[in-house]
Amino acid sequence: MEKEFVKELIDLVKNSNIKMIKFQKGDTQIVIETFENREPVKDQRSPEEFTHQEILPPSEEVSEEEKKYHVIKSPLVGTFYRSPSPGAPPFVEVGDIVSPGQVLCIIEALKVMNEIESDVRGKVEKILVENGETVEYGQPLFLIDTDI
């Protein structure tokens, strides 16, 4: 997909009352959404120069229960999978002890399988997402008890 076409879509949303636009061509899908109550970007960089984190809104606050645990959040939008393939055992179960670098799940985005690893050592207290569910950027996926 050409950069110029993507820029035109961004300009279309930016200069109109459109709140969201979706475009799909083959296996490629583009979703551009405006966010209310968002301060305007004062930076003079082009859209390609912003990082993924700078473009998206901050994730929702964690619950009181989640505050006592380390939260593993989704680094991207995609489909959550607990195992490497259908029928295979899950990467982790509630109660498992995990180490930094250990794969916890896969998130599929644009037909790319992205392994999500633990960044701490601890016990998996809760898995917050169902297998095959769509996840958002910054969405909590796992609660890890690091006081083991």
Image (cartoon, rainbow, N blue to C red):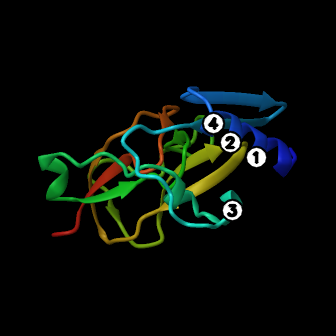
> Residue 117, image x and y in percent?
48, 63
- The number of numbered discs placed on residues in the rendered structure image is 4
Q: Residues within 10 Å of mark 3 (few under 14, many from 20)?
A: few
**Residue 7 numbered mark, or none:** 1
- Label 1 with label 2: CB-CB less than 8 Å: yes
Q: Which residue is mark 4?
A: 15
Q: Amino acid at mark 4?
A: Asn
Q: Which residue is mark 2?
A: 10
Q: Nearer the viewer, mark 3 or mark 4?
A: 4
Label 3 or label 4, whichever comes before in sequence order: 4
Cα distance in 3D space between marks 2 and 4 = 9 Å
Furthest residue to the right?
Answer: 2
Image quadrant assignment for residue 20: top right
Q: Amino acid at mark 1?
A: Lys
Q: Nearer the viewer, mark 1 or mark 4?
A: 4
Q: Which residue is mark 3?
A: 46
Q: Amino acid at mark 3?
A: Ser
- Label 2 with label 4: CB-CB less than 8 Å: no
Q: Residues within 10 Å of mark 4 (few under 14, many from 20)?
A: few
Cα distance in 3D space between marks 1 and 2 = 5 Å
Front residue (pair 84, 106): 106
Label 1 or label 3, whichever comes before in sequence order: 1
> Residue 110, image x and y in percent?
71, 43
Label 2 or label 4, whichever comes before in sequence order: 2
Q: Residue at (31%, 45%) from the top-left corner?
A: 60
Left or right relative to 144: residue 1: right
Image quadrant assignment for residue 17: top right
Q: Residue at (77%, 29%) from the top-left corner?
A: 24
